[in-house]
Amino acid sequence: MAELLRTRALAFGYDRRALTEPIDLALHPGEIVVVLGPNGAGKSTLFRTLLGSVAALSGTVFWGGCALAELAPRELAARVAWVPQQPGAAFDFCVEHYVMLGRLGRLAAGAAPGRGDREAVSRAIDRLGLGRFRGRPLSKMSGGERQLAAIARALAQQASTLLLDEPTASLDFGNQGRVLDTLRSLAADGLGIAYATHDPNHALRAGTHALVYLPDGAIAFAPVGELIEPELLTRVYGARVEAARTADGRTVFTLADATLAHRAGSPRADAGPRQAGEG
Amino acid sequence: MRRRFSPGTDSVRYVDAAGPSRGAESLAWPWVVGALAIALVALALYALGSGRFHLPLGEVLRMLAGAQDVPPAAETVLWQIRGPRVLAVIVVGAALAASGAALQSVFRNPLAAPDLLGVSAGAALGAVLGIFLGWSAIVIQASAFAGGLAAVALVYAVGTVLPLRDRTLSLVLAGIAIGSMLGALIALVKTLADPYAQLPAITFWLLGSFASITAVDVALLALLAALGLVPLVLMRWRADALALSDDEVHALGLRLPALRLALVCGATLATSATVAAAGVIGWIGLVVPHAARLMVGASFARTLPVSMLLGALLMLLIDTLGRSIGQSEVPPGVLTALVGAPVLFALMLRRADG
């Protein structure tokens, strides 16, 4: 299976201070890497480093076997598309035009989008079920619809990997599920996907691998089934996480009720908040 | 307007996958361009005929078609006076509106405009210095461009250094600060200028005037403005990527600094050419792109030509009005401000409505 993304001993951060230990991760077609970690741990910084917006402190990022530093912007754009946390635009484009922005890196200077570009935009819009919203201005869309439009823009770019920074962050319950199911079906089509989230349940619903920021800058990267369990999550978030089972046998994670824990006299893992503050 | 067509768009969705992309918005778009172009031609014909020396429409048309059997006075009025003037007005209006549209894209801010970012003030200082030192017209043009470019570079540098998170705000603040500094320098040149020979020229010119434009001025103006418009036309699609965050532009595969530089230089060159030819004319660059976006949506590839047509039309309307309402001509800068401010206000109100 062709490798879409690999990092070798990648250290990242600002002002020459690494946020975590060096990372070795790999992404293949059909895989979804879920990035989990406390606030401020550096999930966005990792993405920005993978995209080359921030220089790596050391180590190398390979996109499709090529070192990031050797890729022209246009070559990088053919390999990876980026969906920011709260997609929007300074001007109130309609959905169709917003999705068309994904094609700009492919156009020659001065050239107008051609038939192929319009078809790619059309397919991306239909793929995400936004057909009804083609002509609608972004300002008249809900947060969930706008997130889907941003994913459509990334699809129109026709890159082999999608990176998404907390795509579910500002969405209601139903829209979170819709976005996750969309990511899962895109991975089933053969895309590689990596996304950050604050909800470990998302890893179980739409994730093949997890990259987890542990306390003290440690990193864990493994298949979801081997990694995501309550003890680890308790260490990550500094709050006790419990697992429960739904009637149809799925595992869900939930926070232990702190007041109940106090009443039972069991001490909490109080190191957590302090560590989050340091990160 | 756009949304009213959306049910129709839906019903054709299944017929042709590529079809709906030419739906709602583009239906209105050729009509807008056509209507504006016809209005511009009609107004230009009227402007060529109107004035103290009236030329009937038929005569104007015959002369434009190349007729020789017309009174020499009419020939002089059309080809030496009104022709260059109308052409200059059209070019200035189009260039200012195009520059405004481009700068609004670059600075991700619908309130950006050549006058707000110090471009006009810098170009004005360059040109005022040129008048003060008695330079020739072409050197004044060059000095205006240098002044405009230096001003916007300074605004950009100061805006980048300012430790504010909001880069648009820091740029606009830098523009205001440097604009007022340039204003002070212009005032200084004015106090140093000869109060009888130079000062009236500078003062009158700062308000903007098309009264003394010659055919040579127009040729130079049109050439420089066209040169400035080249990068804008080439980048008409990519400019829209600037509405996204820096990281997104980069991830789309575009070179952000080159894109910004091309648009800023083009807009500055076009603006400086207008300032050197006709003085500082505010508001067109701010108001017209707004109106264009309301008419055809936010896509720069559409707002650029619509802004140019609308800017030319508005400028021509203002100039024709300015030279016919009073005993002496009302400077265009006065009328653009009087018309522009309420129009902007009305646009903002409409936008707030939804």
Image (cartoon, helix red, strand yellow):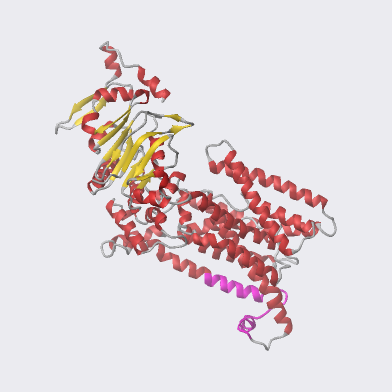
Outermost residue to the bottom: B69
Q: Tell me where residue B271 sits by quadrant.
A: bottom right
Query: Does residue A163 appear in this view?
Result: yes
x then y, percent, for residue B283: 61, 55
Q: Name the quadrant containing residue B311.
A: bottom right
Q: Residue at x 57, y 53 (%)?
A: B264
Q: Nearer the viewer, residue B36 or B50?
A: B36
Residue B315 visible in rendering: no
Residue A118 lies in the magenta-colored region: no
Q: Residue at x 41, y 26 (%)?
A: A279
Q: For this view, does A57 lie left or right of residue A169?
A: right
Q: Is residue A3 left or right of residue B321?
A: left
Which residues are the magenta region?
A: B37-66
Q: Tell me if residue B208 comes above or below residue A15 in the rendering.
A: below
The residue closer to the viewer here, B211 or B295, is B211
Identify the residue at horizontal 28%, vertical 34% (top origin). Answer: A210
Q: Position of residue B148 (x, y in %)?
A: 65, 53
In the rendered image, residue B61 lying in the magenta stretch gets the answer yes
Residue A152 screen position, x and y as percent? 33, 50
